[in-house]
Image: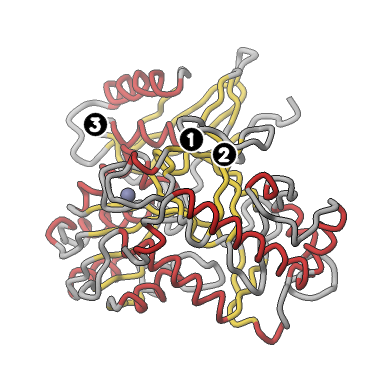
Amino acid sequence: MWNPLVERMAPDELRELQVRRFGRQLAYAYENSPFYRRKLDDAGIDPDGIERLADVRRVPTTDKAELRDAQTGDLFLYGDLLATDPGDVTEYHQTSGTTGQPVRQADSWRDWEWWGDCWATVLWAQGFRPDDRVFFPFSYNVFVAFWAAHYACERIGAEVVPGGNLSSAQRVVKIDDLDVTAFASTPTYALRLAEVAREEGIDPTDTAVSRIVCAGEPGASVPGTKARIESEWGADVYDHAGATETGAWGFSCTGEAVGLHMNEAQFLVEVLDEAGEPVSPGEIGEVVVTPLDRAAQPYIRFRLRDRVELADPEVCDCGRTYRFAVGGVLGRDDDLRKVNGVLLAPTAIEDTVRAVEYVADEFRVVIEAHPAKDIDQVRVIAERTPDAARDDRAIATALRAELKGATNLSCRIEVVPYEALDRFELKADRVTDTRDRHE
Ligand SMILES: [Zn+2]
């Protein structure tokens, strides 16, 4: 373990430590961030009055929309969220802005070292060691993506190969030539790289890659997708959960359970029901995260909109006392769609598509009004694999039946030739909803 003292700490002690550090972070935010001073004053919160978890829950949560508002106008780049002197900022990153104006993220050097430590916890738990040679096939730009994982590898003592400005074909050739032992990517791109490797005449299972850490999408905890990446590469696949704002708050380990431990040394992770009360193990709730030691841009009780199923630490056999999210991030509130009264999680479709024989990795989902009837319909466009030994009709029938079982919806299936759909290099965008949203 990267930090065995905390990773094995008794849950009661751990909770006490978290509450103490939450109090310290809250007082810091109040003192230094005009945004939080205003917010806490408005809510009548005494920043020095945090003694137990019940006190934490009285503190208002922070929403993404508030961050955007705080950074709008001509104040300065980071708005009044900033809690340090602008001269102390050493890193600029921003969110992708898929759901609105991007949020700008300031980090000081101390914060950046903290990011590295969080990622070192993730990578060490997944078996990354100094003798690893780790490839980073992402575009090193304004998005935080795998930047902190790159630094964490150096911190662990592993060798880093920065594969930024290369084509996918050049990347797989490098992975092969350099005997790379591990790489980091989105689940979508791990599958894409395997596809490209085969096009280049490289069998991914013949490379030295034995470990892949995924981030950016829930795929590595979606059983069908995880299994498919593992068989494509002949490697173990690990998951991570994080956000530009909060950092890496969750990670899978080499233990048996599929899902994510919460990094309770660096974050207070709350899983809450709709009334804002903590859920019990076995129940699903929304993740609210407080990074416990941030300087430049602190976040108090940030609503991630991710949903997880909470479990006790014992569900995993690795010995960590950190609580667990079974099956990883189950979906984001933003992703869930209501179709004919049924709640549809795109990850359920992904899991099914990836588990059906002769269906390739890439797919699309279109949710639309039925052309004739007054109902919605879900159209799933799936590719046949190059070696498919069934006709399109048989593939569609099998996929339709599996999807009915998984989602309770009767989907329309279109089978298209292999590689008919565009591929993604970072996060995939597979779901289109053309319905009139006013209904
Ligand atoms: Zn574990």
Q: Position of residue 249 (x, y in %)?
A: 49, 56
User: Does 273 sit above or below residue 30?
Assistant: above
Give the CA distance from mark 3 to mark 1: 19 Å
Mark 3 highlights which residue?
Answer: 357
Determine whether label 2 and label 1 are within 8 Å by CB: yes
Give SS at disc 3.
loop
Which residue lies most toward the bottom here? 87
Q: Is residue 201 left or right of residue 15?
A: left
Determine whether label 3 and label 2 are within 8 Å by CB: no
Marking on residue 335: 2
Q: Work out whether mark 2 precedes mark 1 in sequence or the reverse, and give the earlier one.
A: 2
Q: Residue at x 28, y 50 (%)?
A: 318
Q: Is mark 3 within 8 Å of ligand 1?
A: no
104 and 33: which is toward the camera: 33
Q: Amino acid at mark 3?
A: Glu
Q: Is residue 305 left or right of residue 167?
A: right
Quarter holding residue 355: top left
Give SS at disc 1.
helix
Task: Tell me the crowding category of disc 1: few under 14, some 14 to 19, or many 20 or more residues within 10 angstroms, Cα based.
Answer: some
Q: Amino acid at mark 1?
A: Pro
Marking on residue 346: 1
